[in-house]
Every structure is written in C-alpha cells, then in structure tokens.
C-alpha cells in the first residue's frame, strides 16, 4: 500500500502539515506514516499525538513511529517508499517561526519524491485551483505533478508564467527607465507557451496566465486563491538546497497555501 510520509515535531506548522497530509491520504486512499525524529532520550509521544490528530481529521490508516538520528537523513531514508513527503515550514520558538527550517529545505532540495511544505492549513481552500509555476523552459515533470493534483481535487489548473525584466544597471546601481508597455511581450509569450503547453491546456479547466512581475511576487499573489502551488527545482548534484532559488524560498515562507516542490529531472 502506498503512503504519505509526514515529519512531525510538535510545532504548529507540524500540526498543520499533519492535518493537510491526513486529508491527502484520505483523498488518495493511501496510508499515512507519521514520523518524529529525535535524540536517544526522546519518546514517541509527539508521533502518537500527531497520529491522533490525523485520525480526527479524516478516515485514514495511520502508522506512528519515533526514530533516533539526524532528522533530514532519517526522513530521506524513509522518503524512498512514499509517494509524497509533507513537512511543516518552521519549527518551535519565536526565531524559528521567522525562518524556513533546515530540514524542510533539505528535504525539498533533495527528496526523490515531491515534497509539500505547509505553513498552515485552511480546509476551505482545498476546493481551490492548483497553481503551477511555468519556467522559461516548461518542465513536463513539474506540470505533470500539478495536473495530477488538480485531477485529484477535481479543480482547475492555473499555469502561471511571470515575465520579469531586470532593471538596467548604471555604475552598479539600477538606472531609471521610462515606462515600458509589457503587452506585446506578454502576448508573444502567451502565443509561444500556448503551443508548448498544449498537452496540459487541453484540460477544460486549465488556464494559462502570463503576468508581468517577479516570479516570487506573481506566484505569491496567485497563492491567495489556490489550494496548492507547485514549483520545480533544478537538479544540481551537491548544490540542491541552494538550487531551490529565491523564488521557492519566498513561496515557502509567505505563500497563502501549501507549496509542493518537484524534482525537475529534465533540467539535470
């Protein structure tokens, strides 16, 4: 039986990740594997409490486990037998709540399966569209993952491409430029992408959106009306955490819905 792996630590984002994962396990008809990784003097209370939360959320088979070791290493070992890994974005404490956790980044940057980072969970948004960030060169792996998520929900698929024109620098500082009308560029991009994205735009509920702006800002705005934002990572062996990029980091921190990071093997 397939499973969803959720790493828990007793934090509020960890509880939100558990609730989201329980909903998804029920939706997919798979088992939920709840894991808490701690030190040698730890116990399984955190895992058991998360399992009880999951059972209260949905009708799902839950296995709870406490293991000792380094969290990112242990979760990576377990990720290979899961179809999805789910983690909270942040840990405990005032400082930890302001930054993305190292375990979340490590898993998102190197897990062999899609990783979903959850800051909080609003069940009312589960029926919203799925948003996928479309890169300059669209990746079939990422688009396929987003299409699957939209299909599971029976909701729309928004394919979002951001056109961003970096400022021209003059003597090391941005130089002032007159206003530029982005309409011709956006129209040309839309025409090109419509052809390249034809297999995914064939869905009756698919919508291509080409929006001027920085990709982070465009996708953050789209996340306000989304159930899930799906983005890819560029595979660079030995540098995968850094390969997530500023856009993905910003989304994980500030998106108004969970963020799925998908390994983009086609960019290797």
Image (cartoon, rainbow, N blue to C red):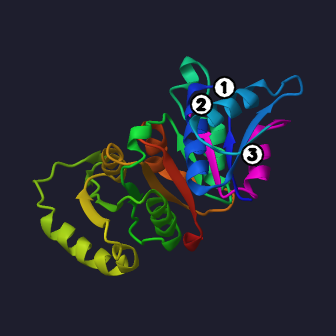
Disc assigned to residue 85? none
Is 7 rendered above or below residue 46? Answer: below
Instruction: Please report the bounds of the magenta region as a residue range.
Output: 65-90
Quarter of the figure that contains the N terminus: bottom right
| Residue 202 % position (x, y) | 34, 77
Residue on which the image places disc 2? 15
Precedes in sequence: disc 3 or disc 1: 1
Quarter of the figure that contains the C terminus: bottom right
Q: Residue at x 75, y 50 (%)?
A: 76
Label 2 secondary element: helix
Q: Residue furthest right?
A: 40
Q: Residue furthest top?
A: 94
Q: CA distance from mark 3 to mark 1?
A: 16 Å
Disc assigned to residue 10? 1
Residue 67 in magenta stretch: yes
Q: CA distance from mark 1 to mark 2?
A: 7 Å
Q: CA distance from mark 3 to mark 2?
A: 17 Å
Is 216 rendered above or below residue 36? Answer: below
Of residues 194 and 2, which is closer to you in this image?
A: 2
Label 1 secondary element: loop
Label 3 secondary element: helix
């Amino acid at each position: 039986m397939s499973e969803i792996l959720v790493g828990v630590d007793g934090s509020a984002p960890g509880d939100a990740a558990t609730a989201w994962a329980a909903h998804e396990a029920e939706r997919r008809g798979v088992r939920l594997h709840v894991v808490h990784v701690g030190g040698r003097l730890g116990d399984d209370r955190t895992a058991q409490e998360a399992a009880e939360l999951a059972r209260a959320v949905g009708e799902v088979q839950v296995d709870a486990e406490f293991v000792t070791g380094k969290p990112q290493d242990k979760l990576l070992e377990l990720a290979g037998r899961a179809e999805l890994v789910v983690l909270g974005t942040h840990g405990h404490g005032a400082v930890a709540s302001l930054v993305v956790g190292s375990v979340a980044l490590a898993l998102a940057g190197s897990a062999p399966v899609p990783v979903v980072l959850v800051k909080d969970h609003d069940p009312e948004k589960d029926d919203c569209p799925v948003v996928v960030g479309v890169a300059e060169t669209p990746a079939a792996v990422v688009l396929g993952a987003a299409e699957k998520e939209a299909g599971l929900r029976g909701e729309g698929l928004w394919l979002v491409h951001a056109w961003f024109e970096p400022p021209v620098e003059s003597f090391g500082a941005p130089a002032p430029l007159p206003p530029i009308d982005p309409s011709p560029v956006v129209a040309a991009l839309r025409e090109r992408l419509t052809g390249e994205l034809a297999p995914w735009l064939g869905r009756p509920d698919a919508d291509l959106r080409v929006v001027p702006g920085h990709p982070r800002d465009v996708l953050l705005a789209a996340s306000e009306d989304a159930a899930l934002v799906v983005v890819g990572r560029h595979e660079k062996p030995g540098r995968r955490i850094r390969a997530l990029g500023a856009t993905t980091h910003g989304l994980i921190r500030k998106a108004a819905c969970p963020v799925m990071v998908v390994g983009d093997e086609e960019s290797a």
